[in-house]
Image: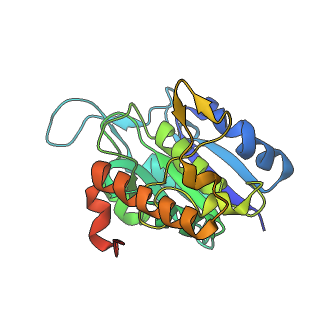
Amino acid sequence: MSFRASVLTLYPEMFPGALGLSLAGRALAEGTWSLETVQIRDFATDRHRTVDDTPAGGGAGMVMRADIVAKAIDHAAPADDARPKLLMSPRGRPLTQARVRALAAGPGVVIVCGRFEGIDQRVIEARQLEEVSIGDYILSGGEPAALVLLDAAVRLLPGVMGNEASGTEESFENGLLEHPHYTRPQEFEGRTIPDVLTSGNHARIAAWRRAEAERLTAERRPDLLQSQPVTK
């Protein structure tokens, strides 16, 4: 069974976007995963295809209507659909590599992309949408965030990456940022490759990489070290 992604959006032309290129694009063409876009406006009931209204209680902007979004969700994901239903939202739980890996191991995802000030809280509760954030900043809509989430998940699907170790030996997989990488030429503008990496001693290389990962994590993301047994 391939990984199935359904994206509910007001801008289906934004997909597949970058997901149609490189590893994700090849996997899409080969059927390793599938992508369906659902135009939320198709479920509007008036001749103007209106999907939003003024916020209850007043305030700036507009809010996407619960009834219309619910119809779109029910169309994309009937009651027997086991895929998690996600809402890309800056107030959601931060997306982590562990969550991405869990999603990639499942049957796929249904992603709702909000616009304007957001969507009516009642449909979030009624359809049990899991709110997911990709960072502490605001985007014009959920579509760029959905592309990020799908890219992170698709690359972990079996067979997508040529070297399966690439998915396990990188930042966040072991709770640390990734160690530095080097390749030819041996010298670049006076800078050389660390001797340990050309020593052929795999134990020393592994220890150096672990130490460098810890150093970078301590400098840039010390919060990640709280649950890490740091080596001496």
Tell me: residue 128, above or below residue 59. Answer: below
The residue drawn where x is 50% and y is 38% is 143
Residue 56 position by quadrant: top left
The residue drawn where x is 63% and y is 70% is 105
Q: Nearer the viewer, residue 178 or 17?
A: 178
Task: Give the x, y percent position of residue 179.
Answer: 49, 53
**Residue 31 visible:** yes
Q: Nearer the viewer, residue 156 or 70?
A: 156
The residue drawn where x is 43% and y is 57% is 213
The residue drawn where x is 56% and y is 55% is 196
* 150 with respect to 1 (left or right): left
Q: Is the C terminus in the top left, top right, bottom left or bottom right quadrant?
A: bottom left
Residue positioned most to the right: 30
**Residue 15 visible:** no
* 37 with respect to 158 (left or right): left
* 22 with respect to 50 (left or right): right
Tell me: residue 8, above or below residue 201. Answer: above
* 176 with respect to 73 (left or right): left
Residue 53 position by quadrant: top left
Q: Nearer the viewer, residue 127 or 224?
A: 224
Task: Give the x, y percent position of residue 55.
Answer: 23, 39
Task: Give the x, y percent position of residue 35.
Answer: 70, 48
Q: How many marks?
A: 0
Residue positioned most to the top: 189
